[in-house]
Amino acid sequence: MKPGKGIPFVDLVTPHVELEGELLEAARSVLTSGMFIGGPVVEQFEREFAKFCDAKFCIGVSSGTDALRFALMAAGIGQGDIVLTVPNTFVATVEAILQAGAKAHFVDIDPRTFNMSVDALREYLRKHASNKVKAVLPVHLYGQMCDMDGIRKVAEEYGLIVFEDACQAHGSEYFSAADNEWQKAGSIGRAGAFSFYPGKNLGACGEAGAVTTNDETIAQRIRMIRDHGQNKKYHHVMEGYNGRLDALQAALLSIKLRHLDGWNAKRREAARNYNQRLAGVDAIVTPPEPEWSRSVYHLYVVRAQNRDDLQQHFQENGIATGLHYPIPVHMQSGYAELGFRQGDFPHSELASKQILSLPMYPQLAAHQQDHVINTLVQFYQSRAVHTGTI
Ligand SMILES: *Cc1c(COP(=O)(O)O)cnc(C)c1O
């Protein structure tokens, strides 16, 4: 790889250089206010992000993991309850369920969208009618929303609370045929959890997260849970955590939020370009976008023949790629106690062996994307044996 020619997997420098003046000004005003925890700057970001998500309330917390955990706890999920999610997610989804005191059970994914399969959800509930399933926690993976009408319908039938892991889906939209409208990630379930980890579509300059909800009781409870269970200084009406969003991050997030729609549009444009230019390559499958979805492409994930060799070839050509995720949660050694085995969730397991995340960020330049596409096409053309259709 020639120096300076590499294509990174994400670019966490350029957006901050572009917005440097505004970000420094916002940081300076927090520094000179002396208000670092809570206060008007945090409240302002919460109002802005609630509005962005079409939700009534937003509660800033210290990470996406805390957002998930606090949302579950605030809705009364705990000891003895089962929460259903998918095995192909970032491990935090499952951590949050377990740390809320509940049990995590899995349903497999739809192999096309990589998201929770409504059929698998229904099948689980039909087969395990005696289980104490209290909630379902679908994950809008890679920036594309799950089939929420389908999930809501099944959840209603079985009396389950629906949450959304929207940690990769800031601004993503779903067309609900049931309600005849486009709906934003984080506005549909009882509560939605967002992460502002730096690499997310809306990223802080440190750790941060938020819960969105239309339920005032949930919002009030999370405000207490994140702040040592206080409803008033030193009045601890429940056991809580130190899980607040700080003012410095909130100030920076408010600035960056103004650019989020524009950044998401650029990601969609880059995705469209990848889709068009890679459509003729039989050895890969580009990510499908159902007509009811407007993905925000947190990640651009293809299924690829000879995935590991392709990744190696990219690396040799100075292109960084990623695997999201190489080991499904039910196969992680630290989660052996959950009692699942290889073969339990075949679609998730197969996906983990075939998926490859290509560079995807708003600042990805056309010539960089050309290089990624040409490198991929050349890899398959140069292989002696025809690899066939995947
Ligand atoms: C990033 C992420 C989380 C956790 O967010 P943190 O802010 O890192 O705690 C949870 N779920 C999914 C799907 C994520 O991508």
Image: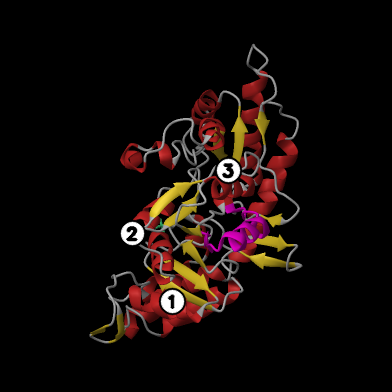
Q: Tell which residue pokes out farthest to the bottom in this image.
A: 232
Disc 1/disc 2 C-alpha distance (Å): 39 Å
Judged left or right of residue 69, residue 157 is: right
Q: Residues within 10 Å of mark 1 (few under 14, many from 20)?
A: many
The residue identified by callout 2 is: 101
The residue identified by callout 1 is: 26
Q: Quadrant of the C terminus?
A: top right
Q: Secondary structure at mark 2?
A: loop
Q: Position of residue 234 (x, y in %)?
A: 23, 85
Q: Tell which residue pokes out farthest to the left in this image.
A: 234
Q: Secondary structure at mark 3?
A: loop
Q: Earlier in the sequence, mark 1 or mark 2?
A: 1
Judged left or right of residue 351, residue 68 is: left
Question: For the residue marked with disc 1, what is the amino acid?
Answer: Ala
Q: Is residue 150 magenta?
A: yes
Q: Earlier in the sequence, mark 3 or mark 1?
A: 1
Q: Is residue 308 magenta?
A: no
Span colored in magenta: 143-166
Quadrant of the image occupied by residue 359? top right
Q: Residues within 10 Å of mark 3 (few under 14, many from 20)?
A: many
Q: Residue at x 76, y 53 (%)?
A: 291
Q: Residue at x 38, y 76 (%)?
A: 247
Q: Position of residue 283 (x, y in %)?
A: 67, 26
Numbered disc in front, either 3 or 1? 3
Disc 3/disc 1 C-alpha distance (Å): 42 Å
